[in-house]
Image (tube, rainbow, N blue to C red):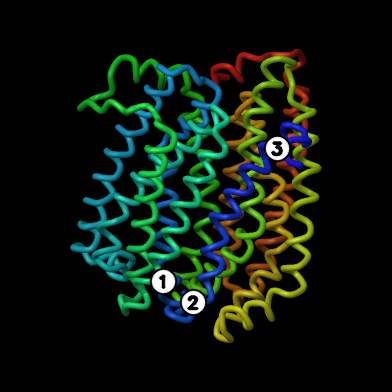
Amino acid sequence: MLATLPAFWKHAATVLTGTVAAQALPLLVAPLITRLCTPGDMGAFSIWLGVIAIASTVATLRLEAAMILDHEKSAQQTCFSVVAYFSTLLAIIITLCAVLAREWGLPQAQAMSWFGLLTIGVGTWITAYNHTASAYATSYRAFGKAALVKVYGAGTIAISQVLLLSLGVGGMGLLAGHIIGLAVGMTAAILLLSPPLPRIALTPTSTQRQFLKKHQSFWQYSLPAGLLNVAAGKFPLFLIGAKYGLFAAGLFALTERILTAPISLLAASVLEVFKREAVHEFQTLGNCKNAYRRTFKALVLLGSGPAIIIFIFAPDFCAWIFGEPWRGAGEFARILAPLYFLNFVASPLSYVFFVAGKQKVEFVWQIALFITTITVFLAPLPLTQILWNYTISYSLLYIVYLYMSHRFSQNASLGRSRSAPAASGEL
């Protein structure tokens, strides 16, 4: 049956199968985890994980996206080398800063365990490598092997966390289990994908500096934009933890898991296929409007069902599956469901900004998104009202984002077909 499908859907189905498998085990063990740890433990773990997500975005310089456009073997090895250099440097700096922050008595550092502080750098380095390896697989359409890597990593995280929590390790078991899973995922990527071996020197080589110059639009515009995007996504958790406590942060963290599990796994699968199709169409036709429209329709179709189910049943679902103390996470999920649906549709299509060389425009939009997040969550209002304001303001911004990405998929703003941005990533 799969052989009769169009190429887009065959590739998407391959990625989706692996992604679903990678997410299935964590979802299955989530009821166990919520009964073995408290919302406070989940809040502390999620804040730690949020720091790693932000740091790993910086560590890659967003050059993993450039590798899909510039997929010569020598260029890809240079990309791995550049990412390895900067991720290593950043991991060392982060670890030193975490230790100093703890010694100087900063409240945020004091609230985190020594194990958490000392593993932020390690988690950042491995996550950056895994992102780069995933982009490498996409550049060669190795969707099946990439799916297996996801399964090994995610499955190990789930199993390790349950085992460590069962042994009475406490909240630290969530952190340790995640590090173990990341390491297994990285090992699987090396063995299955055989990515280029990075070359690390004390300073970047001339070849690496040339690569940085060639793809400067990625670290000049895509990196700040991506960083703002990740920060805007994680800051609500940070601010909720600071204003309303780790218990509320834990509920919000479970809310994100509920929303991202059935929605983002589909978006990630479609994105991996859309990347290749958009680049190919833009380079050959001067636009990628056909790939954009196919992907948009697929995303709306795939995302609407889960969003409606979450909006209707989330509170009772959380109380039944995770335990009554977690019902509040379902209430949060109901409020945020429309926002996450629009995020699901818009996120994969954001690759149009890379292909069309419109990183500057996306950067401006990300600034608006970041300012909106800070403004909403700093308001002196009850948490429920803040979440409603968050959903409404973000939804409006995502509608604007979809309009812009649709225009750029047609190459409408350039006045004539141009494939150079797709080939080099430069403006």
Question: Label 1 neighbourhood size at 10 Å, few (<14), some (14-19), many (20+)?
Answer: many
Where's the N terminus, which quadrant?
Answer: top right
Residue 414 versus residue 335 in the image, above or below: above
- The residue singled out by tag 2 in the image is 32
For this rendering, which residue is in front, 189 or 410?
A: 189
Question: Label 2 neighbourhood size at 10 Å, few (<14), some (14-19), many (20+)?
Answer: some
- The residue singled out by tag 3 in the image is 10
Label 3, secondary structure: give it.
helix
Residue 121 appears at what percent x and percent y? 30, 50
The Cα–Cα distance between marks 3 and 1, rounded to whole angstroms, is 34 Å
Q: Are marks 3 and 1 in contact (CB under 8 Å)?
A: no
Label 2, secondary structure: give it.
helix
- Residue type, mark 2 in image: Leu
Residue at the spot x=69%, y=74% of the render? 314
The Cα–Cα distance between marks 3 and 2, rounded to whole angstroms, is 34 Å
Residue 138 appears at what percent x and percent y? 55, 32
